[in-house]
Image (cartoon, rainbow, N blue to C red):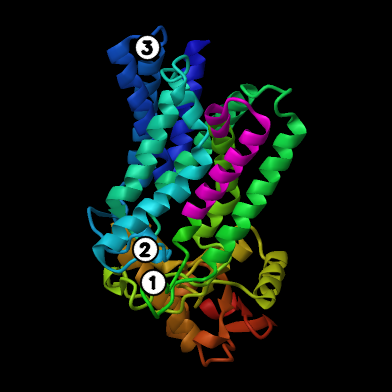
Amino acid sequence: KVAWLVTLIAVLFAATTGGKISAGAVGIAAVCVVALFAMICRPWWWKRAIAAAVFVVGMSGALYITLISGSASPGDLRFGSILDRASTVQGLNPIPGTAGVLLGTAILLIAISLRWAGLIWFINQPATRTSPSVIYGSALAVTGLLAVVFMSSGLNETWFALAASAPLIAISAAGVAEGMRNISHKEMNNRLRLVLAAVTAVVGFIIVSILWRTGPSGGDPWFGTLRWIGPLAAVVVVVLLSALVAKLTIKQLLLKTAVLAISLLALVGVSAQGRFLGIGSDKVGVLPPLSLEYFGSFLPFVNSLDTTTTTQWSNQHVAAADWVKSQAQPDDLLATNFTAGSLVTALTGMRTFASAVIYQAMYGPSSLTDLLLTREREEWAFIDRPSKDTLGPLCKAEVSWIWVDPVRTQTRSWEPFATVVYTNTDATILKLNTSTCM
């Protein structure tokens, strides 16, 4: 039974690593911390912990080497740099300069940690603080937060903390439940708990949302943005409201206030943290005079022909994708001049001759970068200058369909090599005439 359980854990960790390396990294680190504790303190489960760590590291490492390693870009994370900090990108730095970046990072850590507050209850209890789940959760929290402290890449460093949140939220919820059980039903019934939780969450969310929408802006560096107050305001609102209710209903003020605060911080964190990941506002980035010098210069990884970034699709894009999906076979190949991003592949679900060049070049094998850029030039060449010569590479690859973005080309006719079979204001679909490939 134990062997099957350990094997299942290893398989799940391998799948997690394959899905997102940041998720695998924090999980592996936490499992290793549990194993290290087990080796030093020798609790009854120490052998299981070591076996789980060996299997997890082995399976995840093998999958990483097999499927993930070898990408053209090793990643754009900087270690120990104050450039492009997540707090700077999100406008959480309260003052200009290096001190503002450090304070902003600390405030961001508070915003991230709110939803994990239930873990505090277990850490504070002698009976549970050395249990494997609590050690694992603590290691996840530390690992995720350390990534935000020591790494910088705009927002990529926050993925480690986000990955840690999945299991930490479950542990936090259990901690909230255990803390609440210590409040007698006579002193505080379930209905009052629910009302308090709902009111606090709504109040906290409204306050954070209003502060977030002030956005980074010019003007006085102290009052250019109030966004950084959001996480602090959430904590203050929760603690004050918890203390008020505890004083009115509970005899043991400090303990019960702590229980309520821990519980409600976790709830407010779930509702409000999204504001600190850019949801609900297009005001991202710190404008002068708030630490503009702490943004690094952007250098494209490759020189792609398509340099137009598209962040949303239209109803016309969806209609074109629906049409071509209804006509194409599952293994048909599609060419496009919409190559900067992955919009075409995302909407159609079809294989493309070359698309999402920026991402493919960075995360694909370095040996395929030249081929990727060559394919992009070839499909653009035919779309811009249809001829027997430019058609050749598409014929050789057995391309069946071509998605043309009319903004990216002046050409409107591709006869006799390809026929327009569908068109709207945002997309034109061509059917390649294979007879012209001869």
Identify residue type, mark 1.
Val
Q: Nearer the viewer, mark 1 or mark 3?
A: 1
Q: Is residue 243 magenta?
A: yes
Q: Secondary structure at mark 2?
A: loop
Residue plotted at (64% across, 47% down): 200
Give left or right: position of 336 versus 228: right
Residue plotted at (57% across, 53% down): 272
What is the crowding at mark 3: few (fewer than 14 residues within 10 Å), some, or many (at least 20)?
some
Q: Nearer the viewer, residue 431 or 37?
A: 37
Point out which mark residue 307 bears.
none
Point out which mark residue 93 bears.
2
Q: CA distance from mark 1 to mark 3?
A: 49 Å
- In this picture, which residue range is highlighted in magenta? 232-257
Q: Nearer the viewer, residue 432 or 279?
A: 279
Identify residue type, mark 3.
Trp
Give left or right: position of 317 versus 75: right
- Splitting the image into 4 quarters, where does residue 95 fall? bottom left
- Splitting the image into 4 quarters, where does residue 91 fall? bottom left
Q: CA distance from mark 2 to mark 1?
A: 8 Å
Identify the residue under disc 3. Answer: 46
Is disc 2 in contact with disc 1, using a CB cutoff of under 8 Å?
yes
Is disc 1 in contact with disc 3, using a CB cutoff of under 8 Å?
no
First in residue order: circle 1 vs circle 3:
3
Q: Is residue 19 magenta?
A: no
Q: Nearer the viewer, residue 308 or 355?
A: 308
